[in-house]
Image: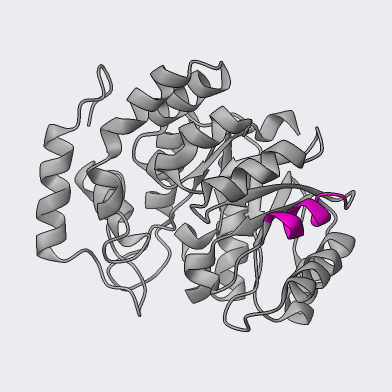
Amino acid sequence: MEQLKGTGVALVTPMSSEGKIDEKGLGNVLDYTAEGVDYWVVLGTTGEYPTLDTSEKERILAYVKSNNPKKLPIVYGLGGNNTQAVLQQIGTTDWSGITAMLSASPHYNKPSQAGIIAHYEKLANAAPVPLILYNVPGRTASNLTAETTLQLAQHPNIIGIKEASGDIKQCATIAAKMPDDFLLISGEDLLTPDLLTLGGHGAISVLANGFPEYFGNTIRLGLLHKNEDCRRAMNVFQDLDPLLYAESNPVGIKEVLRQKNICGNYVRLPLLPASTPLQRKITECLINLDLGSEST
């Protein structure tokens, strides 16, 4: 899946102050990110999919499909902790124009590794597009071990993993033993240079919402094996990146986008827009951020 190597942006879902979908804001985000990234990820965690109803998800997906002049590949986020419900959603989704499906490991239930494998195999058998695993223990309360990932990598319709465990040793094991056509994708922006050094293939990024051209170019350095250049370029985000998660994602990145006049910073309960102290810290970081020729 060459088209999914490089930078995927985990798109935010812009909202109005009343909590409604802001299509104008979404259009701004699509226009802003299209030139710098390699593909879009729609309705991942950053897109606040748990608080969107079915009709809103359909509307957002349709809008992205119809506002894609560069014909970027689209990865669609679809997951949950009820396997049967996810299978039903797969059956009712319009998969036209979608390159792959991204699905987080089931949250809350705390399944065994065997249960995680069985869940993903069901999804992969049903999905009409290739499936990308998503390991994010900080949200799901369970980890896809390297052994589990490598076993699932043998499934013909499972093509990669977004790894957000933060465990470099685990990622190294996957990289060393994964099939040649399996994608190892970083889900931790600041750790992406390390994953690329190990043999990773790119990132699905939160930062890329606010800095698509710079982030995309940074990942390209890593894919060209310019490891130190990639690492130095990513290091400029060392102060900003933690702020994006200080009050939970996507609160921080939406505040960045508000300050860059791209869309509002509104989110849905139980999340709240960035607090005044967080807004001030982000403002200071943006003022001090040195991205060379790219405007901050």
Is residue 66 among the parts visible in the rendering? no
What residue sits 52% from the left and 52% below the top? 167
Which quarter of the figure has residue 199? top right
89 lies left or right of 154: left
Which quarter of the figure has residue 250? bottom left
What residue sits 53% from the left and 56% below the top? 165
What residue sits 22% from the left and 43% below the top? 239
Nearest to the observer: residue 85 or residue 180: 180
Residue 278: where, in percent of width, then height? Answer: 16, 59
Residue 107: where, in percent of width, then height? Answer: 59, 76
225 versus 85 height, above or below: above
Residue bounds of the magenta highlight: 146-154
192 lies left or right of 77: left
206 versus 220 height, above or below: below
Examine the structure image and report whether residue 149 is included in the region drawn in magenta: yes
Which quarter of the figure has residue 136? bottom right
Nearest to the observer: residue 97 or residue 174: 174
229 lies left or right of 158: left
35 lies left or right of 75: left
Residue 45: where, in percent of width, then height? Answer: 50, 62
Nearest to the observer: residue 248 or residue 88: 248
Magenta: predominant secondary structure element?
helix
38 versus 12 height, above or below: above
Q: For the C terminus, which image quadrant?
A: top left
Q: For the N terminus, which image quadrant?
A: top right
Residue 31: where, in percent of width, then height? Answer: 44, 36
Is residue 116 among the parts visible in the rendering? yes
What residue sits 26% from the left and 17% below the top? 293
Examine the structure image and report whether residue 289 is included in the region drawn in magenta: no
